[in-house]
Image: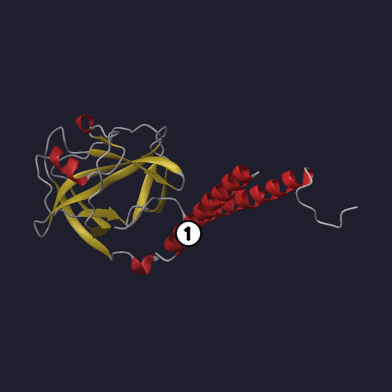
C-alpha cells in the first residue's frame, strides 16, 4: 500500500519536527537565565497626567493564569518618557478597573529595554484593552508617535485576585525580557516535545501492527 506508506512517512516527519521544535524552545528558555536579562534598576517616576487615557490594560499569562497588566506613561527623574507597567496586575479573563492617577510619584525595581510588540485584530484601543502588546498603538493613545520610548517592566509581578483584591501573590515577571516569545515555562515545552515524539512512536507501532495483521510483515519464521 504505497499511498498509506507515503502518508505515514509524511506524518512521522511532521511529528518528529514538531517534537524537535518544542525541544529547541525548551533549551532556549532554559538558557535564558537571570544573567542574560537586562539589569534591575531602581527608578523614581511621575505618572503623566492624561485624563481618560492614563491606564492601558494589557492581557498576559503568569504561572498559567490569565492576568491583566496596567501600563501608564511616566517621566523619569532624567525627564526620559517611559512606558511603565505601574499598577498591580489582576487575575482573571476580564480586566478589573484600577486607576493610576496622573501626577502620582512612585518608585519601582524594574528592567528597562525596548519592546516593539505587534498589531493584533483582537486589540481594542478605543477601550484601552490590548490582548497583544503593541507599543506603537499604546503610544498613539497618548497622542505620541512610535518614538524610541523604552518599556519598564517590574522585576516581580504582584497579582491581585479579581474577586477579592485584598488577596494577592508575588511571582517572577515573565515579561521582563526583550526576547520573550511567550510566558510558558520551559518544562511545558519539554512536555509538548515528549507528546509529539510519543505520537510518532505510536504511529510507527500502529503502522507495523496494521501490516503484520495482514501478513505483510513477519517477525518470525513463516510456517
- At horizontal 42% and vertical 66% (from top left) the residue drawn is 31
176 vs 195, nearest the viewer: 195
Could you tell me which quadrant the N terminus lies in? top right
Task: Please name the residue shown 51% across and 50% down the image.
Answer: 14
Q: Is mark 1 on a helix, strand or loop?
A: helix
Residue 95 horizontal side relative to residue 76, left or right: right
Q: What residue sits 44% from the left and 42% below the top?
A: 65
Residue 186 shows in this picture: no
* 165 over 12 or under it: above or below: above
Q: Mark 1 points at which residue?
A: 26
Task: Decide which of 71, 101 is in the foreground and name it.
Answer: 71
Give the answer, above or below, for where 95 lies relative to 175.
above
Q: Where is residue 78 in the image (x, y as percent from the top left)?
A: 10, 60
**Residue at the image point whose x is 27% and y is 34% from the top:** 121
Q: Where is residue 146 in the image (x, y as percent from the top left)?
A: 13, 47
**Residue 113 visible, this orientation:** yes
Image spot of residue 199 (x, y percent)? 61, 48
Amino acid at each position: 500500500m504505497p499511498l498509506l506508506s507515503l502518508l505515514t512517512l509524511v506524518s512521522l516527519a511532521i511529528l518528529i519536527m514538531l517534537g524537535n521544535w518544542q525541544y529547541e524552545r525548551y533549551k532556549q528558555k532554559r538558557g535564558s537565565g537571570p544573567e542574560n536579562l537586562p539589569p534591575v534598576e531602581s527608578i523614581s517616576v511621575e505618572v503623566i497626567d492624561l485624563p481618560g487615557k492614563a491606564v492601558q490594560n494589557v492581557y498576559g499569562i503568569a504561572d498559567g493564569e490569565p492576568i491583566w497588566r496596567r501600563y501608564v506613561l511616566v517621566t523619569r527623574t532624567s525627564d526620559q518618557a517611559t512606558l511603565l507597567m505601574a499598577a498591580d496586575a489582576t487575575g482573571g479573563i476580564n480586566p478589573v478597573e484600577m486607576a493610576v492617577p496622573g501626577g502620582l510619584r512612585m518608585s519601582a525595581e524594574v528592567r528597562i529595554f525596548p519592546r516593539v510588540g505587534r498589531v493584533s485584530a483582537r486589540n481594542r484601543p478605543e477601550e484601552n484593552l490590548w490582548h497583544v502588546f503593541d507599543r506603537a498603538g499604546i503610544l498613539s493613545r497618548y497622542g505620541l508617535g512610535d518614538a524610541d520610548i523604552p518599556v519598564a517592566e517590574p522585576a516581580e509581578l504582584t497579582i491581585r485576585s479579581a474577586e477579592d483584591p485584598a488577596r494577592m501573590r508575588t511571582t517572577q515577571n515573565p515579561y521582563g525580557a526583550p526576547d520573550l516569545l511567550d510566558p510558558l515555562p520551559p518544562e511545558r515545552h519539554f512536555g509538548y516535545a515528549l507528546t509529539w515524539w510519543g505520537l510518532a512512536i505510536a504511529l510507527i507501532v500502529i503502522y507495523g501492527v496494521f501490516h503484520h495483521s495482514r501478513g505483510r510483515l513477519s517477525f518470525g519464521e513463516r510456517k
